[in-house]
């Protein structure tokens, strides 16, 4: 809880603040005295641009609300007030109704307060004349038939309200009929969301088509909206004409029941019986789109000709096969060329399902704070050539051969050592090769003899760690028809693929280049992090960058899948 001292500190801050827009002090145990201090500061500082005030879940009664409403009277910036879950009674609802006449509020929430029919009547009287309110919360307030009649009156005359929340209001059957009658009879209604009970079953009892019985509330409200829109078009009343000729005043208020029924039947004939899904026109009703939100499906791509005019690009059938290799300065490996192959529908759907299941994780990865070290590491990872190590068995064999060779050269005695001794001896040999003092010679002939015979001045066998070979020994080995000894064979090297990883994602590389031109390292790091995340999850440790011609299984992910997922995410 904020307490008395917190309220005093906050009130002092409001006296000298000229930039705060949102004040949220919900669940802080604020009582009437605390709210009186805050209200006094708000009333004295008329330049504070408050837009949202949230006082939910506190201990405010009508006394505190009266001070608060007096403070915000005539505000030019305030848009939203939430005082739900307090101890406000009818007097507070009446004060809120009066404020609606002087402040252009868009949201007011009075849910779960001790308001009765008297307070609802005052609110609905103000709502019928209001032209700015879009959200009204009355949940947790008991609505009897008398209160429902007042609510029906307000809904029949209001033309701006879009959301009405009346959950847990113990609304009976008769009260529901009154409320729905006010909704469907308003020829200028903007209501899109109504919670608390099902609209369709009640609407059919008022004479509307039986198809509405199984529809959702959103679909029923969309049907009512389109029904009256169609009715206005048939009667030659457009929105522009209604505003200029003053016809809107004649349309305000409930329409006669025969007009409502006739408009509903006409709309049902036009839409058809199976038109429920087509009524999901609001943003919260629509499914997640799989197309680009930047390009409309009806848009046409144009190109500029040599003369400077715009035209629709046309591709001749003879030009369908294009020599892509001629465009690039050097040939790209087979694994990179597979990215240009047209993706089938099954692959696209599989990638979209993967993106939906991992979208939250990708979003969190993209929102991580900027780190210059991470940017450098990811740049090195994607823009450096790929090093493809040999297969596991071959690499293990090469490592064993090298270890045996080093052990045979480093150990003076021929007795085998245990693995721990070998590990210690290798580390000692490495240290000697790095830090031990080089052997000095008094005469040049001694050094020459030592390098040719492989023996030191002390008569011991010299170490072949450097594998220095003379021309005579090499010629003897080559003249012999037998297999070349292992000590004369070249050391095993790791195969390298000089194509960077980013080359496997050409379209993502173009996006990165465009972001680089804008000099936005934060966006670059976010994109590289998401690309690395998709790689780790989809490839699961597999090396997909190996330049081999083996046919991959259909269920295994490829760089083309990763690129498609990132592009869909963008």
Image (tube, helix red, strand yellow):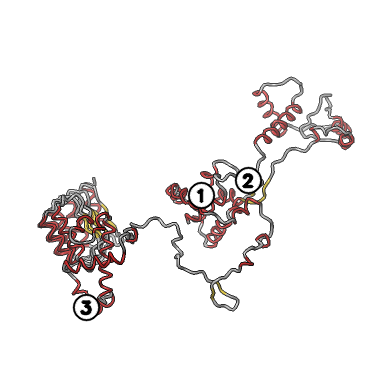
The reply to whether the C-beta atoms of the residues labelled 2 and 1 are less than 8 Å apart is no
Which quadrant would residue 201 be assigned to in this image? bottom left
Residue 405 placement (x, y as % from top left): 75, 30
Residue 48 placement (x, y as % from top left): 26, 62
Mark 3, residues whose alpha carbon is within 10 Å: few (<14), some, or many (≥20)? Answer: few
Which quadrant would residue 546 be assigned to in this image? top right
Mark 1, residues whose alpha carbon is within 10 Å: few (<14), some, or many (≥20)? Answer: many
Q: CA distance from mark 2 to mark 1?
A: 29 Å
Q: Work out whether residue 55 or residue 508 is closer to the camera in this orientation and state it.
A: 508
In the rendered structure, the answer to whether residue 383 lies left or right of residue 436 reads left
Q: Work out whether residue 194 or residue 274 is closer to the camera in this orientation and state it.
A: 274
Q: Earlier in the sequence, mark 2 or mark 1?
A: 1
Mark 2, residues whose alpha carbon is within 10 Å: few (<14), some, or many (≥20)? Answer: few
Q: Is 218 situated above or below 443?
A: below
Nearer to us of marks 3 and 1 is 3
Residue 429 placement (x, y as % from top left): 71, 29
Q: Earlier in the sequence, mark 3 or mark 1?
A: 3
Q: Is 402 situated above or below 507?
A: above
Q: Which residue is rendered at x = 84% and y = 24% of the image?
A: 459
Q: CA distance from mark 3 to mark 1?
A: 58 Å
Instruction: Say which element carries label 2.
Output: loop
Determine which residue is flagged by label 3. 246
Determine which residue is flagged by label 2. 551
In the rendered structure, the answer to whether residue 522 lies left or right of residue 180 reads right
Nearer to us of marks 2 and 1 is 2
Q: Earlier in the sequence, mark 3 or mark 2?
A: 3
Q: Which residue is rendered at x = 59% and y = 79% of the image?
A: 307
Nearer to us of marks 3 and 2 is 2
Instruction: Say which element carries label 1.
Output: helix
Q: In this orientation, does residue 1 appear?
A: yes
Determine which residue is flagged by label 1. 529
Q: Which residue is rendered at x = 18% and y = 58% of the image?
A: 205
């Amino acid at each position: 809880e904020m307490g008395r001292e917190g309220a005093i500190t906050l009130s002092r801050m409001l006296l000298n603040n000229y930039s705060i827009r949102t004040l949220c002090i919900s669940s802080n145990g604020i009582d009437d005295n605390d709210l009186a201090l805050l209200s006094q500061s708000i009333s004295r500082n008329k330049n504070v641009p408050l837009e949202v005030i949230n006082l939910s879940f506190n201990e405010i009664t009508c006394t505190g609300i009266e001070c608060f409403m007096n403070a915000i009277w005539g505000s030019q910036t305030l848009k939203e007030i939430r005082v739900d879950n307090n101890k406000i009674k009818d007097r507070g609802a009446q004060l809120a109704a009066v404020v609606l006449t002087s402040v252009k509020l868009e949201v007011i929430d009075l849910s779960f307060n001790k308001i009765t029919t008297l307070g609802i009547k005052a609110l609905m009287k103000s709502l019928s004349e209001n032209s700015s309110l879009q959200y009204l919360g009355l949940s947790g307030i008991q609505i009897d038939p008398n209160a429902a009649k007042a609510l029906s009156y307000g809904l029949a005359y209001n033309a701006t309200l879009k959301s009405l929340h009346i959950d847990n209001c113990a609304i009976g059957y008769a009260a529901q009929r009154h409320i729905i009658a006010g909704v469907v009879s308003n020829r200028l209604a903007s209501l899109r969301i109504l919670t608390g009970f099902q609209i369709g079953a009640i609407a059919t009892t008022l004479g509307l088509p039986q198809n509405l019985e199984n529809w959702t509330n959103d679909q029923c409200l969309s049907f009512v909206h389109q029904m009256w829109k169609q009715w206005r078009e048939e009667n030659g009343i457009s929105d522009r004409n209604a505003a200029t000729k003053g016809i809107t005043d004649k349309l305000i208020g409930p329409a006669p029941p025969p007009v409502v029924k006739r408009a509903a039947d006409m709309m049902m004939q036009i839409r058809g019986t199976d038109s429920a899904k087509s009524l999901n026109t609001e943003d919260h009703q629509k499914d997640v789109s799989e197309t680009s939100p930047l390009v409309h499906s009806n848009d046409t791509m144009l190109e500029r000709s040599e003369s400077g005019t715009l035209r629709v690009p046309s591709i001749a059938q003879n030009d369908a096969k294009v020599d892509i290799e001629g465009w690039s300065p050097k040939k790209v490996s087979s694994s990179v060329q597979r990215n240009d192959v047209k993706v089938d529908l099954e692959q696209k759907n599989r990638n979209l399902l993967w993106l939906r299941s991992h979208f939250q994780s990708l979003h969190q990865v993209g929102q991580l704070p900027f780190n210059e070290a991470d940017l450098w590491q990811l740049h090195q990872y994607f823009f450096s050539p790929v090093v493809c190590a040999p297969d596991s068995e071959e690499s293990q064999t090469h490592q064993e051969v090298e270890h045996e060779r080093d052990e045979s050269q480093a150990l003076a005695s021929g007795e085998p050592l245990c693995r721990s001794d070998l590990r210690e001896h290798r580390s000692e040999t490495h240290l000697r090769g790095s830090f031990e003092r080089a052997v000095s010679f008094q005469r040049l002939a001694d050094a020459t003899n030592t390098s040719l015979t492989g023996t030191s001045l002390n008569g011991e066998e010299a170490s072949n760690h450097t594998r220095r070979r003379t021309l005579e020994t090499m010629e003897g080995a080559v003249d012999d028809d037998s297999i070349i000894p292992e000590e004369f064979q070249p050391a095993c090297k790791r195969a390298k693929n000089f194509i960077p990883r980013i080359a496997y994602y050409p379209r993502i590389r173009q996006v990165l280049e465009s972001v680089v031109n804008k000099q936005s390292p934060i966006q670059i790091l976010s994109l590289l992090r998401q690309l690395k995340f998709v790689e780790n999850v989809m490839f699961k440790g597999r090396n997909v960058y190996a330049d081999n011609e083996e046919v991959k299984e259909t269920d295994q992910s490829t760089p083309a899948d990763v690129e498609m997922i990132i592009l869909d995410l963008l």
